Structures are given as structure tokens and as C-alpha cells.
Image: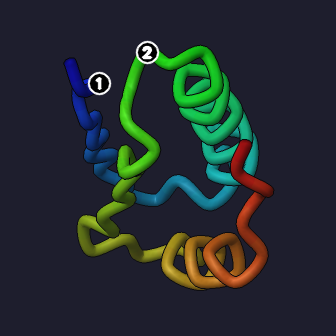
Amino acid sequence: MMNPTLCLIIPCYNEEEVLPQTYATLSTKLATMIHDGLISPQSSLVFVDDGSKDNTWNVLDSLIKCPPPRS
């Protein structure tokens, strides 16, 4: 039996201050679940900027340019 694929959609509205920690926490959890065989390696996180007026988009852009290693 194949492991299920998980895709988390995270809406972001004016989240620049917390995005790095949110990204780190969720990426680590996702990698652990993949490593433990609970979900498929094709699982992913999708962050959606909901029209933020702050620097959310730039923070997201910089996070995807330096993703954490996948296990």
C-alpha cells in the first residue's frame, strides 16, 4: 500500500514576523512524517500570500530559495 500524499495549504496575510518559524516547524514535521513512512515523499507545503500589505511575499520568496534539506 502506498503512503498518502499530504498537501498543506497555509494562507498568509501579514505574517512576515512569524513565517520563518512557521516554515521551519512545518517543514521539519513534514520531513519527519516522510522519514517515518507516514506520508509520501511527494507531500508538500503550499504557502499562499493572501494580499498582504507587509513583507510576507518577500519572506516567502527568500524561504523557497533556501529550502531545508528533505530526509
**Image spot of residue 65 (x, y percent):** 70, 84
Q: Residue furthest front?
A: 1
**Image spot of residue 60 (x, y percent):** 57, 72
- Name which residue type carries label 2: Leu
Disc 1 target residue: 3
**Image spot of residue 9 (x, y percent):** 26, 46
Residue 43's image quarter?
A: top left
Q: CA distance from mark 2 to mark 1?
A: 6 Å
Q: Which mark is residue 38?
A: 2
Is 49 placed above or below 25 here? below
Q: Is residue 15 left or right of residue 59?
A: left
Marks 2 & 1, CB-CB < 8 Å contact:
yes
Of residue 35 and residue 52, the one placed in the foreground of this image is 35
Circle 2 sits in a helix, a strand or a loop, which is it?
Answer: loop
- Name which residue type carries label 1: Asn
**Number of residues whose C-alpha sits closer than 10 Å to that of mark 1, classed few (under 14), some (14–19) or many (20 or more):** few
**Image spot of residue 31 (x, y percent):** 63, 35
Circle 1 sits in a helix, a strand or a loop, which is it?
Answer: loop
